[in-house]
Image: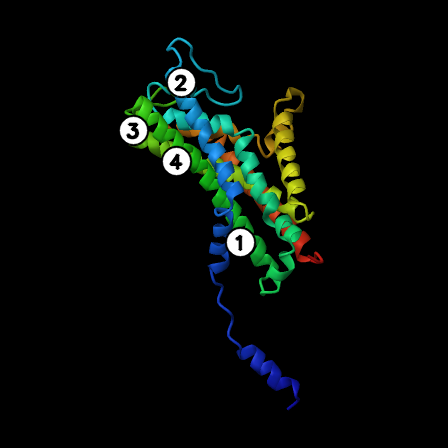
Amino acid sequence: MSAAEPIAGRASARPHRRVSPRFFWSELALLFGRRRNWAGMAVLSAVPLVIAISVKLSSPSSGGGGGEDGPNFFAGITSNGLFVALAALTVELPLFLPLAVSAIAGDAVAGEANQGTLRGLLAVPVERTRLLAVKYAGIVVFAFACTLLVAVVGSVAGLILFGGGPMVLLSGVQVGFVEGLGRLLLVCAYLAVCLSTLGAIGLFVSTLTEQPIGATIATVILSLTSQILNVIPQLGRLHPYLPTHYWTGFGDLLRSPIATESVAPGLWLSLAYIAVFLAAAWARFAGRDVTS
């Protein structure tokens, strides 16, 4: 028997180390414990409050205007307070929500490298694949949290100022309050998935640099560029492949029966972008020489 055989036997008999969720909980504590993130979430929650108070103080004949790309929910606010949440999500979708997710995604890897903690984190040891998985999971949770925050604040403010009751969907069908609340939760889930797509792109950008501000700005620029290209008629053939093209398709979830013309391709496109950019982030980070 050679000397290498006992060593190999001991290595094969060594039990596999269990994957502990402690790293994930630590990441969430870091995300939701930073003051700058709380400040950003405060800005997100202020928008539905401004909308609700503005509509309450305005005259009934003044009406409300919405974005040209999405449904106009302002007209229904006085009839049901849940429309405050839908109007706030529509207003914040082009910039505020993408900016919040981009800031978290851009800081995911670049922030650790910039602070000099990335090398020590990998020496714990934490596998690079697991590190990326935990970072992206934190981004997804943050995207859901921000979307739900806007919806909850908007719903509470709207119900206090305008009351609840039956909700008239975009197709003209009236549904009960509970079903209307369920439709709102579906909208939040869909938008969170769309924002998670931007989070995957931002995570990839974060692996390319050690400057989190630069990664955040680059991700926001990519989001805005996609939205700008999406409104140019001459680029109509390109529109279905843009990551933000189906973001405003959440109106399909507010019809009876629920339409899938925009939601279904929007989900498939989001999953495709997530898979591609997570694979690109892994390919980049797995072979990266970490020096900080």
Using residue 173 as the reference point, say whether residue 270 is left or right of it.
Answer: right
Residue at horizontal 47 percent and vertical 16 percent from the top? 65
Check whether the beta carbons of the residues at disc 3 and disc 4 lie within 8 A of each other.
Answer: no
Q: Nearer the viewer, mark 3 or mark 1?
A: 1
Q: Element at badge 1?
A: helix
For label 4, the residue is 185
Say above or below: 88 vs 214. above
Q: Nearer the viewer, residue 250 or 269?
A: 250
For label 1, the residue is 134
Q: Looking at the picture, how far across and down is residue 3, in whole percent?
A: 66, 88
Q: Nearer the viewer, mark 2 or mark 4?
A: 2
Q: Of the residues shown, which amino acid type is indicated by label 1?
A: Val
User: On the rendered image, what quadrant is the C terminus found in?
Assistant: bottom right
Q: Which mark is residue 55?
A: 2
For label 3, the residue is 177
Q: Is residue 291 visible?
A: yes
- Crowd class of label 3 (few under 14; some 14 to 19; many from 20; radius 10 Å): some
Query: Marks 3 and 4, how far apart in space?
Result: 12 Å
Q: Earlier in the sequence, mark 3 or mark 4?
A: 3
- Crowd class of label 2 (few under 14; some 14 to 19; many from 20; radius 10 Å): many
Q: Looking at the picture, how far across and down is residue 16, in whole percent?
A: 51, 71
Q: Earlier in the sequence, mark 3 or mark 1?
A: 1
Q: Looking at the picture, how far across and down is residue 267, in whole percent?
A: 51, 38
Q: Element at badge 3?
A: helix
Q: Element at badge 4?
A: helix
Residue at horizontal 64 percent and vertical 46 percent from the top? 206
Q: Nearer the viewer, residue 215 or 7?
A: 215
Q: Of the residues shown, which amino acid type is indicated by label 3?
A: Phe
